[in-house]
Amino acid sequence: MRKKIIAGNWKMNKTPSEAVALIDELKPLVANDEADVVFCVPAIDIIPALEAAKGTNIKIGAENMYYEESGAYTGEISPSMLTDVGVKYVIIGHSERREYFAETDVTVNKKVLKAFEHGITPIVCCGESLTQREQGVTIDFIRQQIKIAFLNVTAEQAKTAVIAYEPIWAIGTGKVATTEQAQEVCAAIRTCILEIYGEDTASEIRIQYGGSVSASSAPELFAQPDIDGGLVGGAALKADFGKIVNYK
Ligand code: 13P
C-alpha cells in the first residue's frame, strides 16, 4: 500500500516572516499520519520554514535546485546546500520552470540524477498543454517526458521518486482535470515506469495529480487507484490545505 504524499508548492509567494506565520497557522490543520505532508517553499524561506515546522509532521522541500555541485552559477542553489539544512524533497521540472526558465527534459534528467546522488527525493513534474491534449498526443508526450527524466535512474532510486502529473491547462486556472482524465494519465505514467523498471518499481513509485486541486476535488482525485496524492499550488497557501491533507 503506497503512502499518500500531499505537497504544497508555494511558488514565488510568502516572505520569510510570512512563511513562518503560515506554517504556524497550518501546522495544527495538516496533522495526518497517514500521508506525507511536504511544503515546498522559496529558497529564502527554507531555513525559517524548517525551524517553524520542527516537531510537526511537515517536511520542508525546495522548489528547484541546480545540477552542479558548486561553482560559478550565479543565483543557483546546489544540492548540498539543501541537504546541509535538512531538505528531503525538491520539485524538479515544474511547467513554470520549463516555460519561463528554459528548463528542458534533459536538464530535468540531470537534476533528477543529482537529487538522487544526494539522497533528496525529486518530485518530477510532467504535463501536457491544452493544444497537446486537443491534438490527442497527451499520453505520448508524457511518456517521452518520463522516459527522459528517468534516463540512467536505477530501479532502486525510481522506487523512491515522486512524479507529479500536472496538466498545464489546469494549473492556476480553476479548471481541474476530471477524475477520469487525471486517473488515465497517472495510470499511463505507472505503465511507462513498469515498462522501464518492472512491477516492483511501478507499484512503489508515487504519482501525484496537480492543477487546481481544492478541498472539494481532492477526495475523489486521491481515491483513484493510481493517484497517490497531490501537488497543490494556490490552495496550499490557505487553511484549505488542511482539508486537502485530511481529505478522507
Ligand atoms: P494550482 O493548484 O494553483 O493550480 O497550482 C498547481 C501547481 O502548479 C502545483 O505545482
Image (spheres, helix red, strand yellow):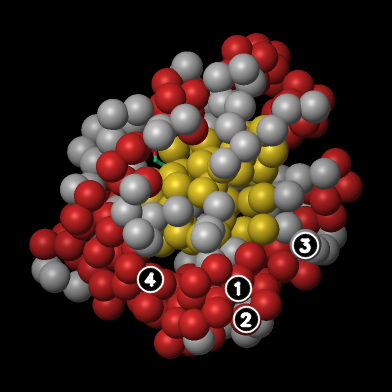
Q: Earlier in the sequence, mark 4 or mark 2?
A: 2
From the viewer's perspective, is residue 157 above or below residue 49?
below
Question: What residue is rendered at 67% in x and 77% in y?
Answer: 156
Q: Earlier in the sequence, mark 3 or mark 1?
A: 3
Can residue 100 be seen here? The reply is: no
* Residue type, numbered disc 3: Gly
Q: Label 4 to label 2, Cα distance in Å?
A: 15 Å
For disc 1, does the CB lie below 8 Å from ligand 1? Answer: no
Any mark on residue 155, and which?
2
The residue tagged 1 is: 158
Q: Label 4 to label 3, Cα distance in Å?
A: 23 Å
Q: Label 3 to label 2, Cα distance in Å?
A: 15 Å
The residue tagged 4 is: 189
Any mark on residue 10, and which?
none
Q: Secondary structure at mark 4?
A: helix
Q: Secondary structure at mark 1?
A: helix
Labels 2 & 1 near each other (Cβ < 8 A): yes
* Residue type, numbered disc 4: Ile
